[in-house]
Image: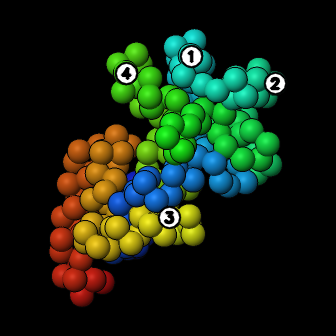
Amino acid sequence: MLQIGKAIVSLDVIEKKFICDISKCCGACCVEGDSGAPLEEEEKQIIEEIYPVIEEYLTEKGIEEIEKQGKTVIDSDGDLVTPIINNKECVYTVFENGSAQCGIEKAFFDGKINFRKPISCQLYPIRIQKYEEFDAVNYNKWDICKPARELGFKNGTPVYVFLKEPLIRKYGEEWYKELQYAAEHIDEIMKKM
């Protein structure tokens, strides 16, 4: 583990290789799992505000579920998350050419909103557990991401490099530079510990 600012970063974030390969997984992370995407408290308000714009991107079933459950929900673990449909896909999931995609992100890429998608989605396979004094930044290995691990290994791309943009979005440019420095000098750092 490395401490960078208020974050304790698992060495897996530096050592494991990963590049999403949506052509092989078909966006399974938007469909699989026991719960919706974890949300930060401020994202709840953002989703409320942008909903009138993103609604046109969503499926009928997604809209129906939002009308029943709400735009965000508290799951069985007490966490704020996106609602899901029939214990499967996120209500904000849309399907194109056989792949699951994010309706929120589609609106973002169309220039209609300035919120790309929940940070937990953009950061995957990193999962952040918030504690009072620090964030635990961990790599989450999920079977459905096997193609991403294979592609990352083939290209030699570490998780933190693949996730540069969302890590900067979450923690800032200076924080990312510290992480990058630590990754590039990990052997020296570990010898000193």
Kindly state the secondary structure of the residue where label 2 is placed: helix
Give the mark, 2 or 3, whose residue is nearer the N terminus. 2
Total count of labels: 4
At label 3, which amino acid type do we have?
Cys
Give the mark, 3 or 1, whose residue is nearer the N terminus. 1
At label 2, which amino acid type do we have?
Lys
Give the mark, 2 or 1, whose residue is nearer the N terminus. 1
| Alpha carbons under labels 2 and 3: distance apart | 31 Å
Left or right? Give the position of 116 relative to 95. Answer: left
- What residue is at 44 percent from the left and 66 percent from the top? 147
Q: Which mark is residue 110?
A: 4
At label 1, which amino acid type do we have?
Glu
Residue 124 percent location from the top left of the image:
47, 54
Callout 2 touching callout 1 (CB < 8 Å): no
- Foreground of the two, 119 or 1: 119
Callout 4 touching callout 2 (CB < 8 Å): no
| Alpha carbons under labels 4 and 1: distance apart | 12 Å
Callout 4 touching callout 1 (CB < 8 Å): no
The residue beneath circle 1 is 56
The residue beneath circle 3 is 145
Kindly state the secondary structure of the residue where label 3 is placed: helix
Q: Which callout, 2 or 1, points to the residue nearer the camera?
A: 1
| Alpha carbons under labels 3 and 1: distance apart | 29 Å
- Is 56 situated above or below 170? above
- Is 170 situated above or below 130? above
Kindly state the secondary structure of the residue where label 4 is placed: loop
